[in-house]
Amino acid sequence: MSFKLDVSRREFLRLSALLTGAALVPGTGFAAEKATDQPVRIGYLPITDSAPLLIAHANKLFEAEGLTAESPRLFRSWSQVVEAFMAGQTNVVHLLSPITVWSRFGSKFPARVTAWNHMAGSGLTVAPEIASAADLGGKKVAIPFWYSIHNVVLQKILSKAGLTVVTTPKDTLAANEVALVVMAPADMGAALAQKAIAGFIVAEPFNAAAELKNIGKVLRFTSDVWNNHACCVIFQHQKDLDERPEWSQKVVNAIVNAQLWMRTHRSESAAILANDGTGKYTPFPKPVLERVLVPDAKLEAEYFASGANIHKDWNHERIDFQPYPFPSYTEALIKALQETKVEGDNAFLKTLDPVFAAKDLVDDRFVRKAVEKAGGLQAFGVTGGWNRTELIEA
């Protein structure tokens, strides 16, 4: 069984086609609307990465800012999210942070990151018989996308284990080789259960679902390799940021307030997002989402005992919420992407200056104001001000 590997490859090629065009511009879906009348049009994938956008909608936080918001549009692939955003069918989306790098610098698409949507929230899940990263030698591991923090972190883990990454299909793997395959997250659990892959690295709650179904175990959390890393970020059209600054500020305010609320309403958030919840935003039951969102001291101890987490002085929340896009992260991400194997044309990365990229990709005007209004960085558990040092250790 291929588990839609061909489909996933076609999705990557589809997105490649979208993001390799020159100077693409947003569609005109909302061009005739007045700035004050433009509704918030959210595009999302049904993963916990999207939670702040969905909670902002569910709790009517956009309306509290004087905006109107349409029901969020659920998409099944990153290429669908990007295509709708480029066409102007949506105006606020969450994207894997490396995809925004590709979009801004690979295709020159006029959009910018305005905030982080969450921190951590991903893990490397493996078959029960896999005891360490070294055991993945000679096997296949699934990733959700080439341009993802998952691919970046996984390659760091495999490199430390002395393994070599293979990105193109081959019939036979050497004992020190690991074949990476792009796979839809929804297919990963079934592929692992049927031994088509030895593991997968992906956003929650797919790792939690695999645990609860007893088909896999978390070998390592990505946040224990890169402390407090961003995964998905908020992406908005440059046109809105330049021509509708008040509207844009209100959008970011709502997202920041959603993150602040979620920090102290974890179980309530799981109930809202669940497949039987008020919004039915995701296909997952509440227990799966609670395993991700709600801290559990017993589970935490088990993860340290197993080695899924090893850095006891790092933030070990399975998923956390802090919206400020630290420049140091974007700079480190650019450097990491330049060292990460991906399929497709990544020539644009080779000469990209990390400091320039961090300033050009991210527009933090709105999120800084929103954070300060919400009580400052300390309200989100951040100490040390608007700068930080990245901690990365596989």
Image (spheres, grey):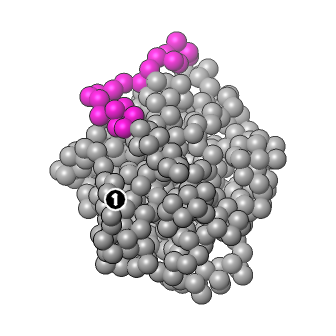
Image check: 44 left or right of 353? right
The answer to whether residue 392 is seen in the rendering is no
* Figure quadrant of residue 226: bottom left
Secondary structure type for disc 1: loop
Assess whether residue 168 is covered by the magenta stretch: no
What is the three-letter code of the residue carrying label 1?
Asp
Give coordinates of residue 90: x percent, y percent: 54, 29
Can you give x and y, in whole percent of width and height, for residue 245 in the image? 49, 32
Query: Image height check: is 324 above or below 80?
Result: below
State the quadrant of the C terminus: bottom left
**Residue 188, x across and y down, in percent:** 56, 56
Q: What's the magenta region?
A: 13-34
Q: Which residue is mark 1?
A: 171
Q: Is residue 33 magenta?
A: yes
The residue depicted at 53 percent of the width and 18 percent of the height is: 30
Q: Is residue 302 above or below residue 28?
A: below
Residue 291's place in the image compared with 188, above or below, is below
Which sits in the foreground, 358 or 338? 338
